Amino acid sequence: MKKIIAILMVLALMFSLTACGGTGATNSAGGATEMTMGTGGTAGTYYAYGGVLGGQIKSLTGIDINVVSTDGSKANIIGINDGDYQLGTVQSDVMAYAFKGTRTFEKEGKMDSFRVIGGLYAETVQLITMDPAIKSVADLRGKKVSIGAAGSGVYFNAVDVLNAAGLTEDDIIAQKQSFADSADALKDGKIDAAFIVAGAPTPAIQELSATNNVYLVPIDGDIAAKLMEGDESFYTATKIPANTYKNQSADVTTVSIKATLVVSASASEEDVYNITKAIFDNISSINHAKSAELSIENATTGMAVPFHAGAAKYFAEKNVTVETK
């Protein structure tokens, strides 16, 4: 009996020490919270950046983040909706379509099982050409223009820009191509211009501009104003700094959407608060080039989807109020 009592006391002491020493969040089974983060292709920014963020979150909160490669924004939202993922990196416009069940989510219908943690970096709408006569969006009329793969985020961005300029897809000779195919088609003279939506500098444009005269067409003035009003509030004004690309001597004004970190709406307020704090209180320790764009302002503007209550709690401590409904 004494031996049994002694063993029970030791076990009780071990449990007590474990409970006192744990710094991470816990799940219903009493262990560390586990979350899977959907990102993008292994060669893309989403996957690499997600891995860095996942490592930082785990080291500072104890939450175990499993970063996985996916097909990107839409797949990540569907994964969260299906319960396969709890976190995901997505385009701010694609998440707006999901929340309303429109455009690329028209077939699947509304998906509102996720919430925003914060914007990460700008994915810039870049309209490029090798024709110096194309100086504005209006100049695209009658031209061969790549507007992204059918149903892609780029496609809808291109349509938005055209519509804001008083044009439709029927006013151009639309070509639906990927980034790489667009660059090749420009170089071969098969198209006159292309929409590319990605963080600047974009490798496909850098490679093209290294050996060719490439021009960035501004998306500004009334066009930008129309894109940033009403339901299209996920667009924000952006400047592509001079010398981002070869022979680009001046800043170019355009618009951008945001690479955004989202989380399951069912995640606990405590976990999401700790995740948000781990990122935005420790920006300087995030070892990735895109971390230079992290800020409270960038994290909280240009979002057409509600924030998670845990993220809202953190931002409130920084005197920033965000919508949660």
Image (spheres, rainbow, N blue to C red):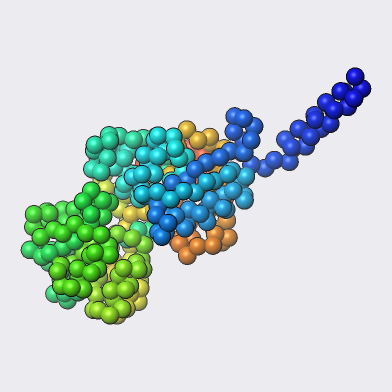
Q: Nearer the viewer, residue 294 or 67?
A: 67
Q: Nearer the viewer, residue 75 or 317?
A: 75
Q: Is residue 225 visible?
A: no
Q: Is 242 situated above or below 309?
A: below
Q: Which quarter shows the N terminus?
A: top right
The structure residue drawn at horizontal position 30% and vertical position 59%, both measured from the top left corner, is: 197
Instruction: Residue 79: name its quadrant.
Output: top left
Q: Is residue 207 visible?
A: yes
Residue 157 in the figure: left or right of residue 50: left
Q: Is 255 situated above or below 304?
A: below
Q: Position of residue 200 (x, y in %)?
A: 36, 66
The structure residue drawn at horizontal position 40% and vertical position 52%, both measured from the top left corner, is: 40
Query: Furthest-top residue in view?
Result: 1
Q: Position of residue 9 (x, y in %)?
A: 85, 28
Q: Position of residue 28 (x, y in %)?
A: 59, 29
Q: Nearer the viewer, residue 109 or 167?
A: 109
The structure residue drawn at horizontal position 79% and vertical position 34%, both measured from the top left corner, is: 14
Q: Position of residue 149 (x, y in %)?
A: 23, 54
Q: Which quarter shows the C terminus?
A: top left
The structure residue drawn at horizontal position 32% and vertical position 38%, both measured from the top left corner, is: 99
Number of on-image labels? 0
Residue 5 in the figure: left or right of residue 289: right
